[in-house]
């Protein structure tokens, strides 16, 4: 009975200060509140640092070593996290976080994806256009500067406009002549607002990356799975201007002098040891209602899984037989396949873990609380009715929207590329000044090499045929654009022939054709181009579906905000943590194994022996580097190996109970002394629904052991210059008092 009650309440996404029902492992906490809300719990679990050493505005602290990685100098979010590990701006992150940039630098002559890359000096480090590294400076609660100027009589559009207006004033006040990048973000569905100040460095260079046979070992097969044996890391360096300010790439720039960098511990860890993770989790939906779960299962995951699966299949054959295409499409394929498998896991997890039923329990409790008081009934009485209606309205158009966007308008790469020519099309139609037309044509010509560098018309033609087929078959005909239907009819429903016609008659299939057109741009040529016409044809249905979906979303936002406000009012003594929204967060937990299913137990670490056991030379996901095999055979692990049960082992990956999500990739895993012990890179398959409901019995973070990282850098790559730059801790501190870890499953056994 006790266990059933516990499981029923876990999904609430609430942490209790005393008599904790939700374990401390759950929650992505804002650093500004660490001392007040989390510090005592963290100390009890093994933290040895002071609160000031963790988070300080005035002094160097742990938060100063955490880096948000983004594309662009004014990020609203971060695709990955990194950590500073030297006093010269060296940063560690995941291999899959650096994958796109490694791929950009790769070619048949220099295949860094296959062979790896190691700069032996700073002069050999490779610049990465568009990559930026953000350092968190400070944050402030600005709720009282925004909420009083909002009212319940406002529409969601009016409310959003007012928030943006006030936020702009608040941001302008903090930028200090554009020295800082400032954002204002909403929390708890728009019930609170916080301002964040960042310093954004724009010169970030590639220093090192293992071969993909290590950094991506296991590929799609092992993705999201445990046990894992992936050396998922890459190394970059942040540069600054000589005066210490952020700067664009320049040979005159110097390595960053960070406020704090992390020492690295090679002393290992044990089951139950404290572990904390800092980073920039992208987004969770822990306050989603049962109505949202139903919407996801009926109208979201099935369509994304199908569309992404079709696109991957269209790419896979050519990538398997053509090395040049494999290099070109490596990053694109990884991005799509990662999401595809994630959605499969999310759908499976929500069903298997009965998340809908758990949500209903709290909603029933909430509704009873509302109906017990006339004032509450007036304010919250229609919340679930309105949420239900909003999802029903969204469900009527979302599949149409997602198909039109992902299978049609932005499915084949050729179509979104044509939209870059819309301005030129308008100029040619209106017969504008010849000089202006030539300037626009020149800009498009200069941008063309970047598009075609990683593009194959042959592969894109296959994608068009495959995606257009499911778009035509799965979406009601009265919603499809007339031009598209006529085209399908002209080719008697043969989508292969349709795609062949488009690619044979379009100017957008090669850099040479685009340049030839731009040398002498003509309105008639562009206007009659079949790819350009198709691209335009999808705009109207996309706008129609989008408008209806946005209207439903507006209604949903309003009532979700009320629901979250009501939950917090219903339980005033409870501490609620906010959903992730790509702002800096801390999570803390322990190193721990888990029981995946009946009679299935997974240990909390893996070793290099498992890499050898998984080797399959016929499958490029499980190829093992020859030098790595030699090092394993000789047990040549250097100071990074560990003797376990009398056998010398090289630990590769390990598990912790930390609460993370997308964006935490590359986050540091830190022990109780503030030392780096690993790099987080994945979640586990059994708890893929964790973005919506945390599952403490099952949910684990998969991390690459920092000793494996150093082993690869040192023994396999021989990059002694990198090793020399690090501060490596080789002596274990006096152990803290032993802790007893009792899982929920064990607790139920003890009760019996």
Image (cartoon, rainbow, N blue to C red):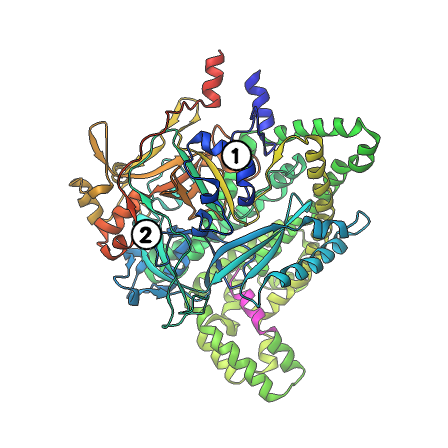
Front disc: 1 or 2: 1
The furthest residue to the bottom: 434
Instruction: Name above or below for residue 322 compared with residue 61.
Output: below
Observer able to see residue 467: yes
Give the SS element for disc 1. Answer: loop
Residue 733 coordinates in the image, percent (x, y): 31, 35
- Overall secondary structure of the magenta section: helix
Residue placed most toward the observer, 745 or 618: 745
Q: Is residue 421 magenta?
A: yes
Say whether residue 117 is left or right of residue 382: left
The range drawn in magenta is 412-422
Camera sees residue 25: no
Looking at the image, tell me whether mark 1 or mark 2 is earlier in sequence order: 1
Q: Residues within 10 Å of mark 2 (few under 14, many from 20)?
A: many
Q: Say which quarter of the image contains residue 425.
A: bottom right
Please tell me whether residue 746 belongs to the stretch shown in magenta: no
> In the figure, is residue 629 to the left or right of 497?
left
Q: Quadrant of the N terminus?
A: top right
**Residue at mark 2:** 212
Percent coordinates x, y for residue 64 in the rendering? 45, 52
Nearer to me, 259 or 479: 259
> Which residue is drawn at the image coordinates 35% and 53% (left, top)?
234
Question: Please, which residue is most extreme toward the left here?
Answer: 634
**Quadrant of the rendered structure where residue 50 is?**
top left
- Image mark for residue 26: 1
Using a 10 Å C-alpha cutoff, classify the residue at mark 1 as few (fewer than 14 neighbours), some (14 to 19) or many (20 or more): many
Whole-angstrom CA distance, mark 1 to mark 2, is 32 Å
| Residue 518 point in image, percent of width and height | 52, 81
Q: Residue visible at 51% across and 41% down?
A: 344
Left or right, residue 86 beside residue 584: left
Secondary element under disc 2, as helix, strand or loop, is helix
């Amino acid at each position: 009975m006790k266990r059933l009650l516990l499981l029923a309440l876990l999904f609430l996404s609430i942490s209790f200060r005393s008599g904790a029902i939700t374990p401390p492992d759950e929650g992505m906490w804002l650093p500004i509140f660490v001392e007040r809300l989390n510090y005592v719990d963290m100390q009890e679990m093994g933290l040895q640092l002071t609160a000031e050493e963790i988070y300080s505005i005035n002094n160097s602290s742990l938060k100063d070593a955490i880096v948000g990685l983004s594309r662009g100098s004014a990020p609203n979010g971060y695709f990955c996290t990194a950590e500073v590990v030297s006093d010269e701006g060296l940063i560690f992150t995941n291999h899959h976080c650096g994958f796109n940039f490694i791929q950009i630098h790769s070619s048949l002559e220099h295949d860094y994806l296959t062979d790896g890359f190691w700069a032996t000096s700073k002069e050999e480090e490779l610049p990465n256009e568009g990559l930026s590294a953000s350092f968190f400076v400070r944050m402030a609660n600005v709720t009282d500067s925004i909420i009083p100027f909002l009212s319940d009589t406002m529409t969601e559009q009016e409310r959003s406009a007012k928030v943006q207006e006030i936020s702009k004033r608040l941001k302008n006040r903090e930028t200090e002549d554009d020295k800082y990048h400032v954002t204002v973000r909403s929390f708890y569905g728009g019930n609170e607002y916080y301002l964040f100040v960042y310093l954004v460095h724009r010169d970030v260079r590639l220093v090192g990356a293992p071969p993909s046979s290590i950094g991506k070992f296991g590929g799609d097969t092992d993705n999201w799975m445990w046990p894992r044996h992936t050396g998922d890391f890459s190394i970059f360096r942040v540069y600054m201007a000589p005066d210490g300010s952020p700067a664009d790439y320049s040979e005159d720039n110097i390595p960053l002098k960070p406020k704090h960098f992390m020492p690295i511990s090679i002393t290992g860890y044990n089951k139950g040891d404290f572990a904390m993770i800092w980073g920039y989790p992208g987004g969770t939906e822990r306050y989603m209602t049962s109505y949202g779960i139903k919407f996801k299962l009926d109208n979201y995951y099935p369509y994304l899984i199908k569309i992404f699966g079709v696109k991957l299949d269209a790419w896979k054959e050519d990538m398997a037989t053509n090395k040049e295409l494999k290099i070109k499409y490596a990053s694109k394929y990884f991005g799509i396949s990662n999401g595809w498998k994630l959605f499969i896991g999310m759908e499976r997890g929500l069903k298997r873990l009965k998340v809908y039923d758990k949500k209903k329990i709290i909603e029933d409790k909430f509704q009873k609380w509302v109906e017990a008081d006339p004032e509450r009934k007036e304010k919250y009485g229609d919340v679930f009715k309105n949420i239900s209606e909003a999802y029903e309205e969204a469900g009527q158009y979302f599949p149409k929207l997602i198909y039109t966007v992902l299978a049609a308008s932005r499915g084949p790469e050729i179509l979104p590329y044509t939209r870059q020519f819309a301005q030129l099309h308008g100029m040619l139609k209106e017969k504008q000044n010849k000089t202006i037309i030539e300037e626009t044509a020149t800009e498009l010509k200069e941008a063309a090499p970047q598009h075609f560098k990683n593009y194959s018309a042959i592969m894109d033609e296959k994608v068009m045929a495959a995606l257009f087929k499911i778009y035509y078959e799965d979406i009601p005909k009265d919603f499809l654009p007339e031009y598209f239907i006529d085209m399908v009819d002209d080719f008697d429903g043969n989508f292969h022939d349709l795609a062949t016609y488009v690619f044979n008659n379009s100017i957008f299939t090669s850099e040479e054709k685009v340049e030839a057109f731009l040398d002498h741009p003509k309105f008639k040529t562009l206007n009659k181009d079949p790819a350009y016409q198709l691209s335009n044809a999808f705009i109207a249905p996309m706008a129609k579906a989008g408008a209806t979906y946005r209207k439903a979303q507006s209604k949903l936002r309003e009532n979700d905000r009320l629901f979250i406000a009501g939950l917090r009012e219903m339980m005033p003594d409870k501490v609620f943590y906010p959903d992730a929204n790509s702002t800096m967060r801390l999570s803390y937990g322990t190193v721990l194994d888990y029981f995946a299913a009946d009679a299935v137990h997974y240990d909390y670490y893996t070793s290099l022996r498992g890499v050898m056991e998984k080797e399959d030379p016929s499958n490029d996901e499980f190829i093992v580097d020859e030098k790595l095999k030699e090092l394993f055979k000789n047990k040549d692990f250097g100071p990074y190996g560990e003797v376990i049960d009398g056998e010398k082992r090289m630990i590769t990956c390990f598990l912790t109970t930390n609460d993370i999500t997308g964006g935490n990739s590359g986050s540091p895993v830190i022990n109780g002394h503030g030392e780096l012990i690993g790099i987080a890179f994945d979640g586990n398959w059994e708890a893929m629904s964790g973005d919506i409901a945390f599952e403490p019995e099952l949910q684990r973070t998969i991390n690459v052991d920092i000793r494996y990282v150093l082993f690869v850098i040192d023994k396999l790559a021989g990059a002694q210059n990198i090793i020399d730059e690090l501060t490596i801790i080789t002596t274990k501190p006096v152990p803290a008092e032993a802790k007893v870890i009792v899982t929920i499953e064990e607790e139920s056994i003890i009760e019996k």
